[in-house]
Image: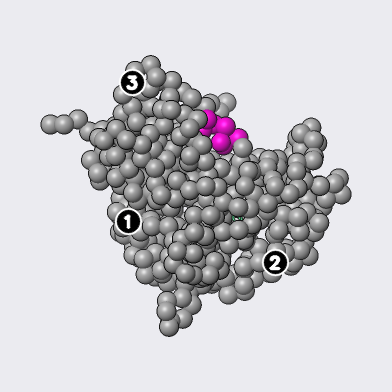
Amino acid sequence: MLKAVKVYLETMGCQMNALDSELVGSLLRQSGMELTADPKAADVLLYNTCSVRQHAEEKVHSRLGWACQRKADGKAIVIGVLGCMAQRLGKDLLSRYAGVDLVCGPGQLARLPELLATARDQKQLAVDEVSRASRPRAGKMPATHRSAAVRQGEQEDDIAAGPALDRLYDGRDVLSTHLPGQAYVRIMHGCDHFCSFCIVPFVRGRQESRSPQSIYQECRRLADAGVTQVTLLGQTVNSYSHRPEGGSETRLADLLERLSDIAGLRRLRFVTGYPTDFDDRLLQAMRDLPKVCEFLHVPAQSGSDRMLRAMNRHYTRDEYDQLIDRARSIVPGICIAGDFIVGFPGESEEDHQASADLIRRTRYRNSYIFKYSPRPGTLSAKRLGDDVPEAQKKRRNGELLAVQAQVSLAGNAALIGSNLEVLVEGVSRRSGKQPKGPAAGQVQLIGRSRGDHIVVFDGPKDLAGQYVNVRIESATALTLAGKREA
Ligand code: SF4
C-alpha cells in the first residue's frame, strides 16, 4: 500500500484563516493525505498566511526561510503559501524563494488538491490564477477582479469577487472543528468598506453573502454531528445580505432566527461587526432569540472623528456612542469587545486621549489594540505616510492597554458571586501550575460564558465540549475563576 502524503499546515492570522485551514484540512484528508503536527515529518509544508499586519508577514518569511533551507539541504518536500500573502505577493514570493512550489489565494483554496498534484507529481510550479495577477490598486477593486469585470462587460460596482469555496463547505468534515462542540461557519466573503489602512478588500475581494439555505444546511450537518455552538463569520458579518433574483432580502437577523430552529444548537455567535450596519432588528434578535449570545465585537479603531475620517470609517464618534447606547438599552447584559489602532498617521495626543475616553465610556469587555503599521497597497500607506514615531506608538499602545485592563477588571469584579453558564473548551494552559493544584482526577479547565468571558475552574478532563454552571469567586482583568456548581 502506498504511504499517505503527510501535510503540515500552519495557520497565521484571524478566525477566517483558522476556518480556511479547517476546510483545507478536510479537503486534503478526503484526497487521501494525512495531516501532521510535525513540520520535520511532512512531505508537504503549507503556510496559510495573513497580510493584515507586518508582524504576521515577517513570521511567514521566517518559516519560508527555514523550509527552503531544508529543501536546499536535500529534503524532498513541497512548499506552499496559501491565503492573503499568497494573494498579495504571489509572484514576489516565487522570485524571492526558489524553494516555493505553490501559491494559492484565499478564494481558490478548493483547487488546492489539484495544485498540489501539479507541484508534486509533475514537478511544476503551481500558481492559482488569482495569485498570478499583479497587486491591486489602493481604493479600487483588485486588478484581477477589475480585468474579469472588463472581460465580461460589466461595471465594477456590479461585481462581487465570487470566491469558489462552495466545494470546501460541502466537503467539510466535523472532525476538524477548532474546539470540542464548536464550529465556525462563514456566511460571507470579502468586504466593501475599504478602510484606508486595511488590505482585506484587496486580498479577499468584494463582499458576497452565501445563500441562507447553504448556511442552514452546513449548520444542521454540524449540529447532527454534535456541534452545539456555531460562530458565524464575516469581515463585517452584520452587513450580511442575500437576495435571490426576484426574491426578498435575508439579513443577519433573519438568518439567526432561521438557525435558531436547528435542534442541538445551543449557542449562536457572530463576529465581526461594522458599526454602521447594526439595525434595531438585529439587536432585538439578540434579545429575543435565546440561542443568540449577548456579545458584540464592534471595532471602533479610534475615538477621534479626525482619525475616523482619515481611516475612511463611515461613522462619527457620536454615532458610535449612540450605537453602544442602543445596544445596551435593547440587549440587557450585553458584552462588547472592540479594536483600536494607535499611532495612525497624523494621530495627535488629543486623538489618542479620545480613544482612551471611548474605552472608558463603552466599558468594553476587552479590546484588541494594535500599533499602526502601513500595509503596502493600502490607501493610508500610499498617501498618509507613517509619521508617529515608534516610541510614541509604543507608549500609546501601553496606555490604552492599561485603560482597558482597568475597565475589564471592574467589569469582571462585578461578576463575583454570580453564576455563569460556561462551554468548556478543554484543559487550561496553566493547569497544574496554580499554587494549590486541583484535587485528584481533576484539572484546571477553561471555557467561555455567553458574554465571551474566559472562565477557569477545576473539573474532570472529559467535560470538554459540555456546558457547566460556574459560581464566580475571583477575577482578574483577563479571567474569571470559580467553582463548578452541582
Ligand atoms: S471593515 Fe475595514 S477593517 Fe474591516 S475588513 Fe473591511 S476594510 Fe478591513
Instruction: Indicate the position of residue 353 as horizontal and vertical percent values.
Output: 83, 48
* Observer-nearest of 348 and 137: 137
The amino acid sitting under disc 2 is Leu
The amino acid sitting under disc 3 is Lys
Whether tag 3 and tag 2 are in contact, CB under 8 A, the answer is no
Q: Mark 3 sits on what residue? A: 75
Farthest residue in the right direction?
Answer: 350
Classify mark 3: helix, strand or loop. loop
Relative to 185, residue 29 above or below: above
Which circle's residue, 2 or 1, is located before the other in the chain?
1
- Left or right, residue 319 beside residue 425: right
Circle 3 or circle 1, nearest the eye: 3
Is residue 60 part of the magenta span, yes or no? yes
Please rate how many residues cluster around mark 3, counting C-alpha atoms within 10 Å: few if below 14, some from 14 to 19, many from 20. few
What is the C-alpha distance between the residues marked 2 and 1?
A: 38 Å
Q: Mark 1 sits on what residue? A: 167
The magenta stretch spans which residues? 55-61
Farthest residue in the bottom direction?
Answer: 246
Instruction: Indicate the position of residue 222 as horizontal and vertical percent values.
Output: 34, 57
What is the C-alpha distance between the residues marked 3 and 1?
A: 32 Å
Farthest residue in the left direction?
Answer: 1
**Residue at screen point 68% across, 51% down:** 379
Quadrant the N terminus occupies: top left
Which circle's residue, 3 or 2, is located before the other in the chain?
3
Relative to 436, residue 199 above or below: below
**Residue at screen point 52% across, 41% down:** 89
